Amino acid sequence: MESLAPGDPAHIGPYKLVGRLGAGGMGRVYLGRDVDGRQAAIKVVRAELADERDFRRRFAREVKAARAVDGRYTAAVLDADPDAETPWLATAYIPGSSLADHVADHGRMDEGELRRLAAGLAYALSAIHTAGLIHRDLKPSNILLAGDGPRVIDFGIARAAEASALTRTGVTIGSPGYMSPEQINGRPVETPSDVFSLGAVLAYAATGRSPFGAGATPALLYRVVHNPPDLSDVPAALLPLVSACLDKRPAARPTVQQILATVVPPVMVAPTITELPETHVEPPDTHVATRTLPVRPVLSRRRVLAAGGAAAITVTAAVTAPAFLTGSRKKRRTNGPSPAPVDTRSVNPPRILWQLTVNTGTPAVATRDTVLVTENAETDDGEVNGTLSGRDPGNGARRWKWSAPATPAIRAVAQDHNTLYVATESRLYALQESRRKQLWSAKAPFSVIDVADTAVAGWTRDGSAVSTLICLDRTHGHQRWTYSAGAADTSWISVSDTTVAFADGGEMTAPNVYAMDTVTGRQRWQFAAGRYLGPPLATSDAVYVGGQESSPFCALDAKTGQVRWKAAFGQTDVAPAADQSTVYVIDDSANTLHALNVTDGSERWKFEGMAFRGVWGPFSGIVYLTGYYDMAYALHAETGRLLWSYHVTKPQQAATTGDGTVILTCSTAMNKNTVYGLRA
């Protein structure tokens, strides 16, 4: 970003300008901030265009259409004034380098990066085309590489400028080397023109150069129209797709839907790749299942406690030639009902207040007015030092930082009754939330913890195969009892004021759920219900558990283990959530979240989707869902009405602060999390 120059305006509309972001054929782009401190990229139209009445009319029409463009893979339009003395357009500011700068600084992309780029650009073009727009100027400098994927910018006003007097004076709307042949020849420009530009961008990212070379504009334009592209260094797996996109004949190019059906990025799919049907756009509906990239989920989707570490999951995917090139497809396998197509569009998406990527596998924890974020840093001698930071929910700024003595790695964090619990490799620390004053510490190297009104409990290992469950008094940290369980599932524990519940860890045996008395450590009962049970949830008077196949979801009496009621489905291995009246449970076989009455198991409502990862809450009357198709959902807890959905990479866990800020933790890479602050 450059400083403002003499003659630059101080304000545009409600935005105070703070710097220059760049310039193009249609105007200059500034960075601005509104009165709430939100940043925006503001494009101010050139004076020559502003003087044309027809341009202003077309500009207003294009801006209206651009407001409807999905903002997942684009810079969402925030505001505009076509009638201002100098027309302007404000879009969301996307921090990150452009594709052009990235390739210049780091060299060409590898195949995995190209897959992600191709999918992101295809999704962006799909959103733009759905709104009735054509980009017309897709090029490396108009693609920003944000932390959560590529974003396409500078759409929405190219068409308004194309027919202006400015273009008749020799200014080209579009970029030589990335414009389609029909655009160069002055023929009608439709969606295949953007597909051609996408192919040229992919070739640039793969090779570090334009597929039509460099040089003077007339020479470049001639090569685009008449010469074949230079694709000599494009990876073989992507070559058929890129070559097809760069076909001189618009009708011969793949559609955006065919590109999406071809490029399967690892961040969007489970390991088993099956048939990938073409997508189509439908109006959003409260209970319409999601679509696009339907695959059978085969990962273990263990819900992670707010205090627990998240396991990194490695997935693989293949890029094949489009079906229209190869003429073959894999037959999709199913298990039970055929999954509904997956819709990865956001519905009434929340506003991103801030985002932060940190080196940790531990999800963020939300308190009434603070977001707790763990950061682990590796030292030169290979040790890992951990810190806990308290951050402002509104902007993500760090308010304070705490490190344990000798700064070992932090494994888990929890919060209850204004007390923070921080588990390190050697001890558990209890801190007063407001002052970060240490209340007590105990020799309990927990990897997973949970907290109730009177107790805190978790799993620890002594270096052998034996796992030990330790329960501590929440007020003073005194050890109440321990329990050794070699076969226990140490990734999960659930604690209430009366019961500590956990399950066996074996999948090939008939595992059990165990209930221990929170005060005495006495085993109350043991329950077996099938080949594999999901993680249990303990409340003061019940334990909820479900399982795969013939194992129904059950409500058990916390004291006796007797079955109170059964539901006609299992929950697989995703833990439920509950409040005083309702238990929220995922039935993975039918891709449905059920809200059940805690008294008799009768259904209050259900929400259908695809491959849900976990259910969280309710928080202030809202239940949150995270899914394996990069989707997060907010549902009204009483009715199941969809309040909003949001497309974001690998959403893992949701929480809220007292002011309603949604804190979404996403597992973006091995031992890395991206934390988002969202406001509906």
Image (cartoon, helix red, strand yellow):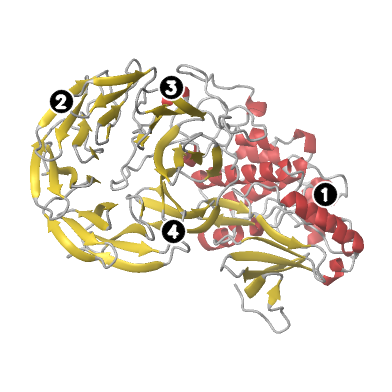
Image quarter of residue 315: top left
The residue under label 4 is: 356
Q: Nearer the viewer, mark 2 or mark 4?
A: 2
Question: What amino acid is at disc 2?
Answer: Trp
Q: Position of residue 155 (x, y in %)?
A: 72, 54
Mark 4 to mark 1 CA distance (whole Å): 40 Å
Instruction: Kindly report the distance in space between the C-alpha atoms of the residues bearing marks 2 and 1.
Output: 74 Å
Q: Which residue is mark 1?
A: 183
Please tell me which of labels 2 and 4 falls first in the chain.
4
Is residue 304 visible in the rendered image? The answer is yes
Q: Quadrant of residue 566?
A: top left
Query: In terms of depth relative to the viewer, which is nearer, 230 or 662?
Result: 662
Residue under the image location 85 percent in, 67 percent down? 50
Q: How far apart are labels 3 and 4 at the CA level?
A: 34 Å
353 or 195, nearer to the observer: 353
Nearest to N terminus: mark 3 or mark 4: 4
Q: Position of residue 135 (x, y in %)?
A: 74, 50
Q: Earlier in the sequence, mark 4 or mark 1?
A: 1
Indicate which label's residue lies in the foreground, 3 or 1.
3
Q: Amino acid at mark 1?
A: Gln
Q: Nearer the viewer, mark 2 or mark 1?
A: 2
Sequence-wise, which precedes: disc 3 or disc 2? Answer: 2
Mark 2 or mark 1: whose residue is earlier in sequence: 1
Q: Which residue is mark 2?
A: 525
Label 1: element kind: helix
Q: In the rendered image, which residue does mark 3 sit on?
A: 589
